[in-house]
């Protein structure tokens, strides 16, 4: 039971991180970020 709970939490954390990354990318100007990467 404990293992299942841990796994569930792990999966949730991963999903949350993914969603956060996507949300941040959409919120912030993606073009600027890409330009910075391309320039360097």
Image: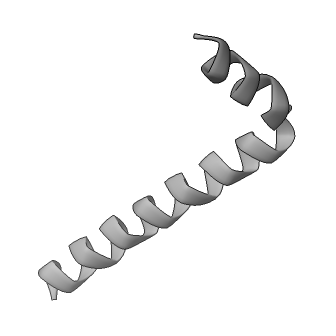
| Most foreground residue, 23 or 35 | 35
Counting from the top left corner in percent of width and height, residue 21 is at: 61, 47
Residue 3, placed above or below residue 29: below
Residue 29, placed above or below residue 26: above
Tell me which residue sits at (63%, 59%) in the image.
19
**Number of numbered discs:** 0
Position of residue 11 in the picture relative to residue 7 (left or right): right
Instruction: Identify the image's colour scheme: rainbow, by chain, secondary structure or one colour.
Output: one colour
Locate the C terminus and report the quarter of the image it occupies: top right
Q: Quadrant of residue 35?
A: top right
Residue 21, placed above or below residue 13: above
Tell me which residue sits at (71%, 29%) in the image.
34
| Most foreground residue, 39 or 18 | 39
Counting from the top left corner in percent of width and height, residue 37 is at: 61, 21
Residue 17, placed above or below residue 38: below
Locate the N terminus and report the quarter of the image it occupies: bottom left
Tell me which residue sits at (73%, 42%) in the image.
25
């Amino acid at each position: 039971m404990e293992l299942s709970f841990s796994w569930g939490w792990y999966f949730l954390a991963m999903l949350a991180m993914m969603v956060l990354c996507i949300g941040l990318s959409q919120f912030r100007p993606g073009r600027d970020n890409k330009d910075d990467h391309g320039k360097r």
